[in-house]
Image: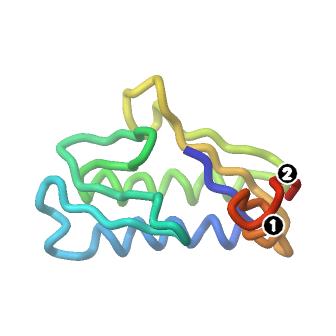
Amino acid sequence: MELMGSRSGLLRFCDLLLQHAAIPGNETQSEHDHYGPYMYLKVQTCSGPGISGNAIYGTVSDLRRLAGIVEAKLQRAAVGSSVRIQQEFGNDREYSLLLDVRDEDFDPASADPELTDGAG
């Protein structure tokens, strides 16, 4: 799963995870919310942490921990670099979370193949 944006934009993903974890009803297993312009990103409460092709999941504690991992990695990431989060969060070796760090002027719509010819 790839998220692309400026450092400040990607840090908003941390806020999203923390907000999801803070909703009392989301402690129940299988509770989930969809995010993003097309609602493709799913954050789901589950018994253990992981990343799949369509969801980021874990206990609310796991999701808070992921927010901390993302924040720490973004503090050290240079513009133009990619940060991969995989085993730090879950044991699944098939999927990872890739954070593609762009400059602060980056417009996410410019990289959206639904809105452009993909040349963003």
Q: Nearer the viewer, residue 61 or 112?
A: 112
Instruction: Work out whether mark 1 precedes mark 2 in sequence or the reverse, and give the earlier one.
Output: 2
Q: Position of residue 118 (x, y in %)?
A: 81, 53
The residue positioned 27% from the left and 74% from the top of the image is: 22
| Front tag of 1 and 2 | 1
Q: Residue furthest top?
A: 93
Above or below for 29 versus 10: above
For this view, does 95 lie left or right of residue 27?
A: right
Disc ID at residue 42: none
For this view, does 50 lie left or right of residue 86?
A: left
- Secondary structure of the residue carrying tag 1 is helix
Residue at which label 2 appears: 80
Above or below for 118 versus 85: below
The answer to the question of whether label 1 and label 2 lie on touching residues, with beta carbons closer than 8 A, is no
- In terms of image quadrants, where is residue 115? bottom right
Q: Type of residue at label 1?
A: Ser
Instruction: Judge the density around disc 1: few (<14), some (14-19), many (≥20) Cα neighbours within 10 Å.
Output: some
Residue at which label 1 appears: 110
Q: Position of residue 62 (x, y in %)?
A: 31, 51
- Secondary structure of the residue carrying tag 2 is loop
- In terms of image quadrants, where is residue 52? top left
Q: Looking at the rendering, in which quadrant would you find the C terminus?
A: bottom right
- Report how far apart the C-alphas of labels 1 and 2 lie in the structure: 16 Å
Q: Type of residue at label 2?
A: Gly
For this view, does 99 lie left or right of residue 62?
A: right
- In terms of image quadrants, where is residue 112? bottom right
The residue positioned 53% from the left and 66% from the top of the image is: 13
Q: Position of residue 50 (x, y in %)?
A: 36, 39
Q: Position of residue 30 (x, y in %)?
A: 18, 54
For this view, does 59 lie left or right of residue 110?
A: left
The residue positioned 45% from the left and 40% from the top of the image is: 53
